[in-house]
Amino acid sequence: MTTHDSTPPSESAWSDGPNSDAPSTRRAAIGVDSALVAHGARPMLDGTGTAFRVWAPDRESVQLVLFDRSTPPKELRRLGLARQHDGFHVGSVSGLGPGDRYMLSPDGEGPFPDPASRFQPLGVHGPSEIVDVRSFQWTDARWRGCPLEDLVVYELHVGTATPEGTFRALIEKLDHVRALGATAVELMPLADFAGDRNWGYDGVCPFAPARCYGRPEDLAALIDAAHARGLAVILDVVYNHLGPEGNYLRRWSERWFDEAHHTPWGPALNFGVEAVRTFVLENAAYWVRDFHFDGLRLDATHAIVDTRDRGEGTHLLTELADVARAAASEREVLLIAEDERNEARLVREVSRGGLGLDATWADDFHHEVRRIIAGDHEGWFADFEGTTGELAKILQKGWLYDGQMAPSRGAPRGTPAFDLPPPRLVHCVQNHDQVGNRATGDRLSHGVVLGRYRAAIALLLSTPFTPLLFMGQEFAASTPFAYFTSHEGGLGHLVTEGRRAEFAKFEAFRDPARRSAIPDPQAPDTFARSKLDWSDSLRSPGKEILALHRALLQLRREEPAMAATNRVDYDVAALGRDLLAVRRRPRRLGEPLLFVVGLRAGGTVDLAAHAPTAPPEGRDWHIEIDTESPTYGGDSPARLAGATLTLASAGAVVLRARAQRANARTVSQ
């Protein structure tokens, strides 16, 4: 390896000229040319060396510190970077390329990892590694992504989805996901974090795939393999905060953070500063462009504070969506918000005053379903009555709260969403938050009779809203998904104590002895017990629950009635205390489908007596799928006599209209 004293890269290398601070110039470079970056190390396109760029406006000097590849690493040489007027320190080193390691030293301190490091082979406190994913041999040239209307999300945590917990091991599970009927895999955050166990929301190296899951090329191989199977891949990204351990941004400048605004997890990033804003926009483009991700799930957008008066009035989220789409070129890329506010503006078109994202999580559906079938009533569940009438309102509007007072908050919540196409709202009955933020990480299937669980699955997959499945729910996984971390020293102790203290307000954990039994997030066993046991899918009840998911998703994929995603071809009605009906109509050819769901209990209903459930003229209903048939693990199948349907217990049926027969008779599966 040869080096020379650093000099500023040429104007063409950085796209910096007289108008270098103009957002439009920088944003275009981010989205289109992978050689043009504002932050981090980038190998030269001609292979002659590597260019470096770090934003440290409060520092007089920054040195590039080169290391060998040994463990522990040995320092080789220090080279000075050139300070620019905009606070960036830049330089290039010939003969330096992928695999070489370095750190950065501001004003003689440290050295510290590159804030925009592409890989941290020895952890978030060690040297950064130069990476060039452009050298990966992709085979997905014909892949065009997944349209929102076809999206069925399978959310997973890489570290617990397989025994090995790696990108490469996950490739072996892609055929299962495809056979299930999902169309996209959503990976929980990958930004590298302190330790080797974490959900990912404590990431501190936003550009570096977590080394405990594998190398960057392993991640590329996973995405390429997914595309070969017709699966999109979505990445969960965190732009509202950084984790508490290994976060060195303040070493470069206090201006990274907005001290006037704090999130529940720490100070907010300062998006009023162009360099900070560009850091996040470049990150979004990087994942889409260099790793071929098909979408980004934006964590806690309600905690992203954008107060900068930008003249043109463009919100950060709108800019982010534009940059990500430009980076994708001809591929479809989806931007999905996770936002607790029920804020319809997030997904309205920019031309209508919206922010232009594609979809947003809408957890009111989950909360109402859980209130009905599990009886949860504390915390945010206190905002829901647990009635079929209220659930019907959610399925009509997309969410329940659209401006009315939320008791648990003592303030109004939500905005009307009736004008939004249903696929723009993401519904689930489980996700990582709703499982992992329970005290013991118990899943929905652990605490309710399976008839209710099967009914909830059928309801989720009956509507035109975008469904999200959480890993293992498709076979009623016996394993929990607990909260786990691996912080060092005092921080780890604080996490353990804080985790247990937050449940003191819940009736079941007011006794200190009960709280002490809550799994310790820091314990390796808490992580180990959260790994999926894939043998659950081969034995009862898992194999029958899996068969139900596959049957319902096949119906969703193949039936013309399920393809219509507008509200005109979709009806919902509460049929008394326990039953709910969802009717789907094809836009053109084909027969309607009727879902009758008993989440809490069964019941009897005269389908002909209700307009939403009456069969089309000259047609009778026939049972197509019955969740309580032995095929799906039930033992009390529904009965249909003429137009009278009886569910013997909690469960659901899918009814198809057929030509009338001379003599009506009982039909059951």
Image (spheres, rainbow, N blue to C red):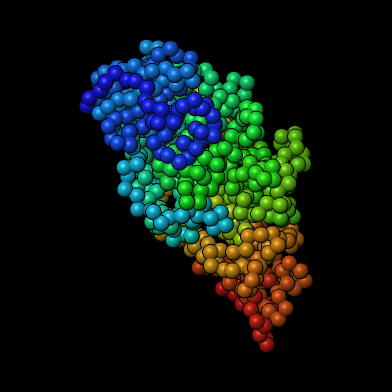
Quadrant of the image containing the C terminus: bottom right
Residue 49 in the image, given as x and y percentages of width and height: 29, 30
Above or below, 144 against 198 in this view is: below
| Residue 174 vs residue 218, the one in the foreground | 218
Report the number of numbered marks.
0
Is 69 above or below relative to 237? above
Relative to 328, say whether 248 is above or below.
Answer: above
Which residue is rendered at x = 64% and y = 71% of the image? 588
Q: Quadrant of residue 89?
A: top left
Which sits in the foreground, 263 or 34? Answer: 34
In the image, 532: left or right of 458?
Answer: left
The residue depicted at 42 percent of the width and 39 percent of the height is 33
Visible in this render: residue 563? yes
Looking at this rendering, what residue extends furthest in the front direction? 18
Q: Residue 384: name its quadrant.
A: top right
Front-most of residues 629 and 458: 458
Left or right? Give the position of 177 relative to 315: left
Residue 106 position, x and y percent, is 40, 15
- The location of residue 578, given as percent across then percent down, is 70, 59
> What residue do we see at 45% from left, 14% from top?
59
Quarter of the N terminus within the rendering: top left
